[in-house]
Image (spheres, grey):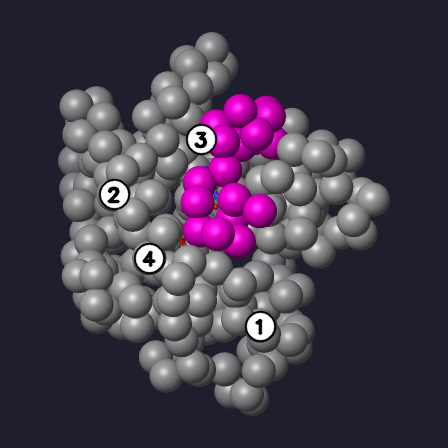
Amino acid sequence: MGAPVKNDRVAWLQGPSADCSALPAERKNPWRLILLGAPGVGKGTQAELLTERLGACHLSTGDVFRAAGKRRDCDQSPAMKAALDYMRRGELVPDSTVWEMVCERSHCILNCGGFILDGFPRTLGQAELLKELMEKENLSLSAVVNYELPVDEIVQRLSGRRTCETCKSVFHVKERPPKVEAVCDRCGGRLFQREDDRPESITVRLEAYERSTAPLIQFYKNLGLLLPIVAKGSPDEILARTMDRMDRP
Ligand code: AP5
């Protein structure tokens, strides 16, 4: 049997007028997950593995902003240009811009195959807006997975990260190297280092996480949805730990 078709997430990356190459299959009990954790903890890596396992769509707000950054200057709205400046510095994009962009793609969140949200919500304001949208549509979250790792290991993961410019698959020069240097194993695309993985941006991102995103842990704990997971070990070990926690009643 060949490898499953990877959803290219065109609609999520480009907006409402685009279609994906592979829509998620309709499921009776679709997984609707949020992945929380500091920048570089491994959310994107786990989202890819969980997508293969659970069939839900991997939706990353960071990927949307990076895709917008690759468009021609004249195709970027003023709000998107400002968002890209925040991102390069490692700061959070304002809630209003993030929410406008998520609303344009709300069909990705409301689809019948479920979702794995990676990098959204990132502030209490965003979490409240998502909660309202889901309540209006009569949908509920399955769980909020919170990945935990010491800061020195996070910095190591970020500084060695390489990302495919075509399919967004994530590698690490030492821990998860591609078979051929700088070439994506999955699609043959070119691997690049993200601009916000420079040391000065990493510091700003970690501060923004502590200030704005860490409070979400208590928010989802109060809702009884939080699953804390130690993010040490190989990606497959962390996936097994995550699946094990999600299987518990
Ligand atoms: P975003 O793209 O969401 O970045 P992030 O949250 O900072 O997270 P990262 O993508 O850096 O890390 P990750 O946890 O996914 O780790 P990964 O799997 O790649 O956001 C970027 C920016 O966009 C933000 O700073 C902000 O400006 C803006 N933005 C986005 N969403 C926003 C929102 N909602 N509100 C406001 N602003 C927003 O792994 C990292 C490395 O480690 C890789 O090299 C990987 O191969 C390696 N690795 C992974 N797992 C392991 C393992 N188990 N062992 C060894 N190495 C591993």
Q: Give the amino acid type for the residue marked by disc 2 in the picture.
A: Glu
Residue tagged by mark 3? 28
Residue tagged by mark 4? 203
Between marks 3 and 1 in the image, the one whose residue lies nearer the viewer: 1
Q: Give the amino acid type for the residue marked by disc 4 in the picture.
A: Thr
* The N terminus - image quarter: bottom right
Between marks 2 and 4 in the image, the one whose residue lies nearer the viewer: 4
Structural distance between the alpha carbons of marks 4 and 1: 20 Å
Q: Is residue 103 left or right of residue 157?
A: right
Q: Quadrant of residue 225?
A: top left
Q: Residue furthest top?
A: 136
Q: Which mark is residue 210?
A: 2
Q: Residue 208: x, y in percent?
A: 33, 43
Which residue shows up at 25% across the image and 43% down it?
210
Q: Earlier in the sequence, mark 2 or mark 1?
A: 1
Residue 214 on the magenta span: no
Are the residues at dot 4 and dot 1 in contact (C-beta closer than 8 Å)?
no
